[in-house]
Image (cartoon, coloured by chain):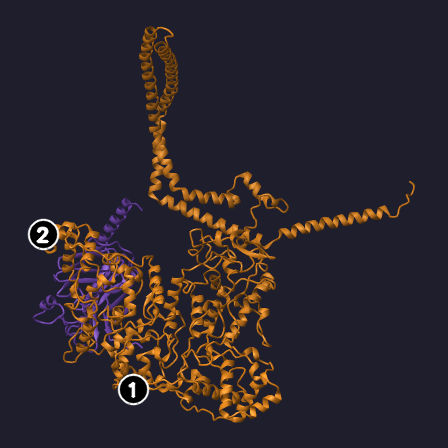
Chain colours: A orange, B purple
Amino acid sequence: MDKQERHYNIFKLNRVFAISSILFLLLLIWTFADDYSRSWRTYQSEFREMEIVQTDSLLKLEEKMLNEMSEYQEALSLLKTVEESLTEKDEELERFEDELSSLDDDKYAASQEYISVKAEYDVAKYLYEEAVAKGHGDPEETGSKLERLEASLLQHRLKSEEAEQKYEDIEEQILGIKADKKAAQDQISRLRRKAEVLGKKLQKVDPDEMTFGNRLGNSIRDLPVLDFLAPYYKIDQIVIKDITEDLNFANVPKVDRCTTCHMGIATPGYEDAPQPHTTHPDLELYLLSESPHPKESFGCTSCHSGRGRGTDFTYSAHTPRNEEQAKEWEEKYGWHELHYWDTPMFPVQYTEAGCFKCHNQEIYLEGADKLSLGTNLIERAGCFGCHTIERYQDKRRIGPDLNRIASKVSKDWTYLWIRDPKAFRHNSWMPKFFELENNSSDEDVARTNQELHAIVHYLFNNSEDFSLNDVPRWGDVTRGEDLVNSLGCLGCHRIENEPTDEVTSLQSLRRDHGPNLVGVGAKTSREWIYNWLKEPKRFSPETTMPNLRLSNQEAADIAAYLMTLDGNGFKGQEVPSQNNLELDKIVLSFLLQMNSDYDSRIMLSGMEEKEKLDYTGEKLIRFYGCFGCHNISGFEDEKPIGIELTEVGIKHADKLDFGLLKIEHTKLAWFTQKLLHPRSFDKDKVKTAYEKLRMPNFDFDEAEVEALSTALLGFEKASYGVKPARSVNPDVHEGQWLVREFNCQGCHFVEGDGGAVRPTITDWLRSANGIDQETAEEVTADFSPPDLNSQGSKTQPDWLFEFFKKPFIIRPSLKARMPTFHFTDDEWNSIIKYFQFLDGQELAYESPHHVDITTSSYKAGEKLQELGECNKCHFYGTTFPSQTADTWAPNLALVKERLRPEWVSAWLDDPQSMMKGTKMPAPSIPTLEEVQDPDVLEFVGEDVAALAGNRSVLINGLTDYLYTIPGKIDISREVLGYFSKNGYNFLQPVEDEEGDEWDDEEW
Amino acid sequence: MNSKTLRKVSLFALVYFSMSFLFAGGTITGTVKYEGKVPRMKALKMAADPICDGKHKDAPARMEWLVVSDSGELKNAFVWIKEGADNYPAPEEHAVLDQNGCIYSPHVLGVQVDQVVDILNTDGTLHNVHSLSKRNPQFNIAMPKFKKKKEVTFTKSEMMFPIKCDVHPWMKCYVAVVNHPFFDVTGEDGNFKISGLPAGTYTLEVWHEKLGTKTVSVTVADGATETVDFTLTKPKKKK
């Protein structure tokens, strides 16, 4: 063979081709293999195993239950009997069926005959009509033919109907024979429904239960390459149209593929299965279609954050709960942080942050305890004083008003207080600014000691005059203490000398609303306390402290008692003397911020000492941002000094300054560090005094920090990939906020929560009345401010409005007093609308309740009231109850003004269900059976007897009667008069005899 | 379970139950005593309600929180099998709680789950019956003078909750709801007797409203009688 002239060697080329095609083939196989070996496939097959086991055991359980169920067994044996009897009846049935088919023929023939006669008849009718009307033919002849045919038609019709009837009879007989069988079969399949469903499911998942064909299909459908057809193992995704996410600048519907691995998430029964197969911990609230957050509408990442499209552990942006878990994940899954994904999943302990994606307008979020604690802490600590947070815009400053400070405290006390508030009061909410991580060196302390002088100077120099009225009476300490313990003061204030081990909760924060009163006697004067109590708003126009309408004597008594609470104060601490050299240095640092070195020195040398103090005081108050929490003259319109937190939840860790601190570089680690040690990021940094971090230390504990971080994490742009925020009715929102801001739940139950004062009422009942703890607990509710659940449907809105403006005594034996809050009409309306909203009550105005006193139901109501002896406990105007004060109940003459009739009737029907534990017994409404007894009949009288058995009419009659009880509405004066004469310690139902009792104190 | 089988089961249980009384079962009996200083029970001031007051003209009624005989036997202690007994169906017989002289009688009442309790109003004045139960739903019903009897049942076992009358605040008694019939309340003589117990080992508890509880383990053989005596003392002050 001639050697062809070529530029290449064909053999060599063949070899190259051969090798590369083998390589490509290998590459192809590798591609398929790589694509095929995905972790979710393993999870799905694991889950399938679990599903088989679970379904199988459920099925077995179901079968076992069926076997034990007599109803099922009866149905089975019935079916058997029926089937047996059917075999016996086989012959009969056969005969019937034969008959039926021959009858069918008869029926058909008869109907055909009838039809043909009918046709003939119609022709005859036509011909006759033609003959009569138009003269075409002989009317007589056609007429007689028609008559004949008419008779024949009737005959045939009867015959046909008869045949039909016969047929139906037989058919019915056949059905009758078969009916029992069908009924038994239906019953069996009804009882077996659940078992059938389980069986079908098992057939689908368990190869052992499959038919041969399916089994074959099952073994090949998931093979590599072939699995594009109809695989069992496949990616499962939820597409949510209403919620969009930003995918490369395009808003596209959210896609969550989480259920690809978390297959058991919405199925009960896998609560104890290992991740990722575990059932969601709260299926009542989430995922199931009947829950408020079905997975079809919300998916997973709408709440949890993360990368919903990810089908791999790392790429779905899982976030570990701590460093330890991060290490574990790295080893187990090769996990690493998804650096470029803005919204990684919330670590599990911060999950509630996700609630804010939609519910960020709500004041109180039931169920989200940690998040609620976080927002409540933010409100109590007043974070929004320095950090703008949209949610808290335009809120009042949370600290006391300092505009009239000189009348309240001394300069020295103020100096020591600002330096270290907790040295005076262990649980003060005033944070510490000085002698922290970044300002504790000798040099720093020397400076800050002088800063404090300047700040105190500024405050007192700018303090307005405030005239203190003299205390007109001598106060009694014991009476004062009793008042503080019983009036309700302790719903907002504590008197605690030492720290307790109480865990911070919404309830504990309610009692932190006002300051702990320990040390108040060492801090201010009797006169100041007296003036403050008499009219808090005169000293501090924006205070949340309400006016308790104290008499001069009461205010004097309380002032006398509070003066005894002098605590340990700042014992042994002294205010360092002023050091002008240091002061000059401070002045200079501030001057230098705006002026040249030369000018600054000239300006300094021209300043008097007072000028220096004025100047630095103002600068320092601005630097530390004191006005964020306090009203200070000259700083009314100052902007907050801190960074805005409205969207801090989506801030990336890269944008946070970790300084030189060696901690984990995550957002949450930073939050935690900042909240626990606010100044620690200055460590090892070189900074001048006024470049340093200045966030004060609030002494939060770890649980508080976790709650705060949860809330911070929840603060994000409303448009960040989720639905618009859930809208709330603005009135309701405002009302809810006022209830929160003024701490109504310190005393009352609202939305099922609150009543923080109650344990202190128990203590008071025990100590003031000498009863034991158990008895005191039993009657606490009777002597505590009322539960306001159902308030919206209970009271007439216009009455409630008047009451808020001018409260008076409703519950005569209650010593706690509803204070006066100086709200605007708008604000009161919001609160009333909020209460009405809670009870689905929409009307602001309603017709007054008209009562017809001539009806028999009214008369019956009057009798029931007499029989029920309501007057034993209730006031009727100024008529006192027949029993002693310990069982007193509200004035019934007030009913018509105060209550809504629908509520009264519902209340009378079942008081316990409306207010658990109430003293009010359910009235005894006679039944038909009861009035058969002549004795009872004699008691209840004719009107009641006539309506006996008609419970609702009798109850409405009783309601009607209550609306006609005459008398004085406001009996405050009579009640107070009684107590001032007879004293208040009426709970002891025993006479003291011979003094030989077992002293309860000895227990 | 349908009603027929339920009936069968309860019939069986009833037969079994009564048989066990006749032929088998052990008995635990004993006395509860109190050791210590006996406080004098204060007189109840019933002036609030003349009907109540009228019923105690001769001698005032006294509190009942610690009733001890001269020789130290303790009344109103509740003795019951705390652990070891099975569930028993409720007896047909009704339990009775009377309001007589504005005092509850008995002061301590043991009933079985689902047993009907007749609450009587012998006084012919307005009472209200307010249960302070925790597991069972609370009720608070008025019993005007015409209402002589009210039937209630408790559907869950619950150890000791008070029933009180808000109209007469001194009125208070204690109720225990037990899921078996093995309990007794001591009388003036401090004696109790629990019989018909299937052979076995049980935890026996004594409860008293002020003196607290004490438990002991008892093994009972068929036909045998075990004697268990308890002595209760004033508990130490809780702090």
The quarter of the picture where residue B142 lies is bottom left
Residue receiving disc 1: A470
Q: Position of residue A699 (x, y in %)?
A: 46, 77
From the viewer's perspective, is A893 left or right of A139?
A: left
Q: Amino acid at mark 2?
A: Pro
Q: Position of residue A518 (x, y in %)?
A: 36, 82
Which chain is disc 2 placed on?
A: A
Q: Quadrant of the C terminus of chain A?
A: bottom left
From the viewer's perspective, is A926 left or right of A577?
A: left
- Say if A588 sits above or below A826 in the image: below
Relative depth, front residue between A714 and A862? A862
Q: Residue furthest right?
A: A2
Relative depth, front residue between A323 and A353? A353
Q: Amino acid at mark 1?
A: Asp
Q: Earlier in the sequence, mark 2 or mark 1?
A: 1
From the viewer's perspective, is A325 left or right of A508?
A: right
